[in-house]
Amino acid sequence: MGEDRIKELREMKKRSRAGGGAERVEAHHKQGKMTARERVDALLDPGSFSELDTFVSHQAYHFGMDKQKVPGDGVVTGRGTIEGRQVFVYAQDFTVFAGSVGRMHATKICKVIDLAVKTGCPVIALYDSGGARLQEGVDSLAGYGEVMLRHTLASGLIPQIAMVMGPCAGAGAYAPILSDFVFMVKDKSFMFMVGPDVIKAVQNETVTFEELGGASVHASRSGSAHFVAKDDMDCIKQVRRLLAYLPSNNLEQPPRRDMGDDPERREEALDTIIPEDPTKPYDMKEVVRRIVDRGEALEVQEQYARNMITAFARMDGRTVGIVANQPMALAGTLDAGSSLKAARFVRFCDSFNIPVVTLVDVPGYLPSVEQENASLLRDATKLLYAYAEATVPKVTLITRKAIGGAYCAMGSKALRSDVNLAWPTAEIAIVGPEGAINIVFKQELIMADDPQEKRDVLISEYRKLYASAFFSAERGYLDDIIEPNSTRMRVIEALTMLDRKREARPAKKHGNMPL
């Protein structure tokens, strides 16, 4: 009797591992895609995966579903390790009912998210689904709702990573967007609320899957994708790299790693990186590379809002979040997209005890009727709100320009940044010297014998007296003005000083961010 039961157990597990069968697996491979189990095995440390709910199957009996029971119900769930740290995973199996979500499918996902929260471990979701399971009707939608609730409750408690490896449509697209980071695979993954066929029927507009919700669209235009991979294995490698920077939960400090880089290293090249002409750009990414450990940084949302850089890096072995204006794109101005990008990143860092290092070179907000008529004011305020709300260590460095309201929003002292530094090249003002002179000395310029010469003299005087970093330092808005070559050393010194920072905020349910 015992041997028969063991044989039955082995047979059931074999059926579960087979997914939708050899033919469907082969068709999946022909698309250049790995199966759900292959992805999980590649993502986790070898031999570490322990599956949950292997034998769960759907409970639907309509439309012939009673004859189509497959152990696992189209989603592989369980736990394992990545570089020795425990994580929980769920991976939708497109070879079983096209990875569609039914009640038991959703129940499995809910269980694994609940376990991740209880144990304080990251949850990684691998999406490859045709959407709601039509044969289960409202049970499918209720299941989706339960999953969304779990992701919402887990937000800020554990890191949540979404790997969109195939289609992800309709209500199923909520879950990735509720996650902290979304990875997509080029030419293989898609996210949208309404598909091309419906758009064609309702709007009489023809659009492809790629044009509607492909990786390039979400990475560069909607901002919904944080990382794009060339194939499944590249996506897996990128996720493992990201996790190395993150703590397992909100009560832990980020992992430290000895990078073998001298914390007192000076970078003489930074002394000359700012052009003499204040209108000429330079690459802020080069500044980042010069000051972080071994020049290594993992940029987040690299293709979206390129006038803002957000990245994870290490400084003296500790994880830091880098937020920096990029003068190479739109002169480093703030717009709606860059404000949203930075605000979301700052809030993640604050949730998971990651210090924020801000590099400022911002001439103001992007002057645009389209921006003003859309959401610039509201989105710009989100960035200010994120910095004001954050209680993690905050270190801000002004390299060149910090003008107007954009100065306030980019980690200014008024928003309780802990240490504010500047290079001697920094200019801090309500408006740029050129604009200020045109307003304050308008009549004098009109009456001058040589208006251009008079303007040049006044601009020079204004820059020295009112826009200079020394003017702000005299008033305590800067803690120090430093030589550029010492930037790495001084930022690390500040982070070390702030290592045990504690900052209280008034007790409340939550604030009302200008969403």
Image (cartoon, helix red, strand yellow):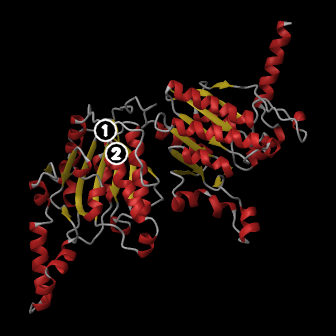
> Compared with residue 53, is residue 62 higher up or lower down, i.e. above or below?
below
Residue 61 sits in which quadrant? Answer: top right
Residue at screen point 71% across, 71% down = 205
Question: Looking at the image, can residue 243 be seen?
Answer: yes
Q: Earlier in the sequence, mark 2 or mark 1?
A: 2
The image shows a total of numbered marks equal to 2
Question: Looking at the image, can residue 298 be seen?
Answer: no
Quadrant that contains the N terminus: top right
> Compared with residue 353, is residue 456 higher up or lower down, i.e. above or below?
below
Nearest the viewer among 485 and 158 is 158
In contact (CB < 8 Å): disc 2 and disc 1? yes
Return the residue at label 1: 505
Residue 186 sits in which quadrant? Answer: bottom right
Relative horizontal placement of residue 52, taking residue 63 as reference (left or right): left
Q: Position of residue 338 (x, y in %)?
A: 41, 59
> Compared with residue 136, is residue 328 higher up or lower down, i.e. above or below?
below
For residue 263, the mark is none
Q: Position of residue 110 (x, y in %)?
A: 63, 32
Nearest the viewer among 216 and 466 is 466
- Secondary structure at badge 1 equals loop
The amino acid pointed to by label 1 is Arg
Return the residue at label 2: 389
Residue 305 sits in which quadrant? Answer: bottom left
Q: Position of residue 439 (x, y in %)?
A: 19, 79
Find the distance from the CA under tag 2 to the CA under tag 1.
Answer: 9 Å
Relative horizontal placement of residue 172, taking residue 338 as reference (left or right): right
Residue at screen point 19% across, 44% down = 490
Relative horizontal placement of residue 376, taking residue 94 as reference (left or right): left
Nearest the viewer among 376 and 282 is 376
